[in-house]
Image (tube, helix red, strand yellow):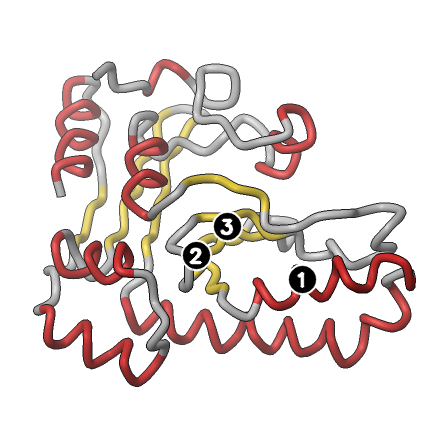
Amino acid sequence: MKLLKNIESFLKKKDIDIELEISKPLPKSEVDKFFDKFYPKVHLSIKSFYIENCNGFSLYWEHGNDCGNMEFDSLTDIQEGYAEFQEYVAFIINNAYENCIEDQYKNQANDILERMKNWSPLRYEGNGDSIILDLKTGEILFNFHDWFDGFGTLKKNNGIFISKSITEYLDNWSNYCFVEPKNLIDDLIFENKKISFNDLNFNKEFKIEK
């Protein structure tokens, strides 16, 4: 993938070693077969990523107090993550729904839960929040792990927009060599009302000028 090679080249100029593993892209027939069995409604942009780019990759580097880390899921990882995430959705529906969500907000919560039935996690934060892939729309979103707790008082939304596709998400973050954000991503959301890949939130020392 070009964006990974760009990071490798950029960091090499700074004498920073990088650990990088990239799985080969998959044949279209294999990807089609996989999703026909697992998730037939999958967005075409997701299929295209695995056919045109790779079947997942891992990247890690560190320099002083900074580090970059991205482990992007293979198709198998997506399927396993989806199954695990849907157990969490079922827990909300069966155990937390009545006690945590105020009556006047139940319709709004139902809409969120219906959307969450299409989600698979890509990356977890230290507090349990996660960056997720919406298999139906192809979008990358942010999931608050406790969004339903006091819904209507403490939280009123979930599934904050990050990027319209896998490619856009990786392009934006790779521009900063996948360096960790200066704060947890939920803090970035509360401050900016959206996630922005900019010098305010990421160390510009590792920004690749394009």
> Which is more toward the observer, 169 or 115?
115
* Cα distance between the residues tagged 2 and 1: 17 Å
Q: Quadrant of residue 64?
A: top left
Q: Which mark is residue 111?
A: 1
What amino acid is labelled 1 in the image?
A: Asp
From the viewer's perspective, is residue 147 above or below residue 135? above
What amino acid is labelled 3 in the image?
A: Ile
Left or right: residue 127 versus residue 23 is right
Which residue is identified by label 2? 133
| Residue 150 screen position, x and y as percent | 87, 55
| Residue 57 screen position, x and y as percent | 24, 54
Is disc 3 placed on a helix, strand or loop?
A: strand
Mark nearer the viewer, 3 or 1: 1
> Which is more toward the observer, 32 or 87?
32
What amino acid is labelled 2 in the image?
A: Leu
> Which is more toward the observer, 113 or 1?
113
Please rate how many residues cluster around mark 1, counting C-alpha atoms within 10 Å: few if below 14, some from 14 to 19, many from 20: few
Which residue is identified by label 3? 131
Is disc 1 placed on a helix, strand or loop?
A: helix
User: What residue do we see at 62% from left, 24% from top?
Assistant: 192
